[in-house]
Amino acid sequence: MKITLNRINDDYLFECKNSIGNTILLDNISQSEGTKAVSPMESLLMAVAGCSGIDMVSIMKKQRQELTSFSAEVEGERIQMDEAKPFKNIMVKFFLEGKIDPKKAQKAAELSFEKYCSVSKTLEPNVTVSYGVFVNGEKVGV
């Protein structure tokens, strides 16, 4: 896997491109005026949501669950460590709608984070990644 990064303005705007030409833009959001993209730390939260979301949808399809809507919210808590501010905790909340067995939705999330999600696995053991599942507006599990 290879990614290229190119600076595309006189400030902090970068275009990142994968091997087949798909791109995302990264920017320095601390420079709020003129920000045109997400920050690298925001993109990490997006990667956690995307990786686990792909896992969950795949698992739910195999379980023959009828998803009519799937979304997630991700929040990261950062700590000061020397000059850096890495994530300490990341919380992912999944919101599923449709004809879904709540136990199967909870199991899909569990499998994603404990077995399949390469992004969250990459962050271990330095970052605690937790999750919550909501099916048709109701919280599942404990």
Image (cartoon, rainbow, N blue to C red):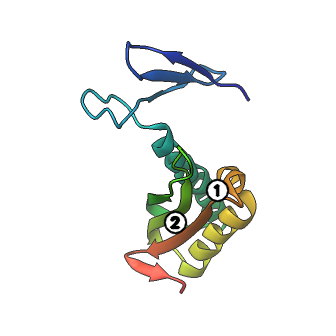
Inspect the image, locate mark 2, and give the three-letter code of the amino acid beneath it.
Glu
Inspect the image, locate mark 1, and give the three-letter code of the amino acid beneath it.
Asp
Which mark is first along the chain, 1 or 2? Answer: 1
- Give the camera-side residue of 93 and 55: 93
| Residue 98 disc label | none
Q: Is residue 13 left or right of residue 40?
A: left
Q: Where's residue 31, x and y in %? A: 31, 32
- Tell me the CA gap for discs 2 and 1: 15 Å
Q: Quadrant of residue 52?
A: bottom right
Q: Where's residue 104, x and y in %? A: 61, 75
- Give the camera-side residue of 29 and 85: 85
Q: Residue furthest front?
A: 82
Q: Residue furthest bottom?
A: 142
Q: Which residue is mark 1?
A: 55
Q: Which residue is mark 2?
A: 66
Tell me: residue 14, above or below residue 123. Answer: above
Q: Which residue is drawn at the image coordinates 71% and 51% (left, top)? A: 122
Q: Which residue is drawn at the image coordinates 50% and 65% (left, top)? A: 91
Figure quadrant of the N terminus: top right
Helix, strand or loop status at disc 1: helix
Q: Residues within 10 Å of mark 1 (few under 14, many from 20)?
A: many
Nearer the observer: mark 2 or 1; the answer is 1
Q: Which residue is drawn at the image coordinates 54% and 24% (left, top)? A: 16
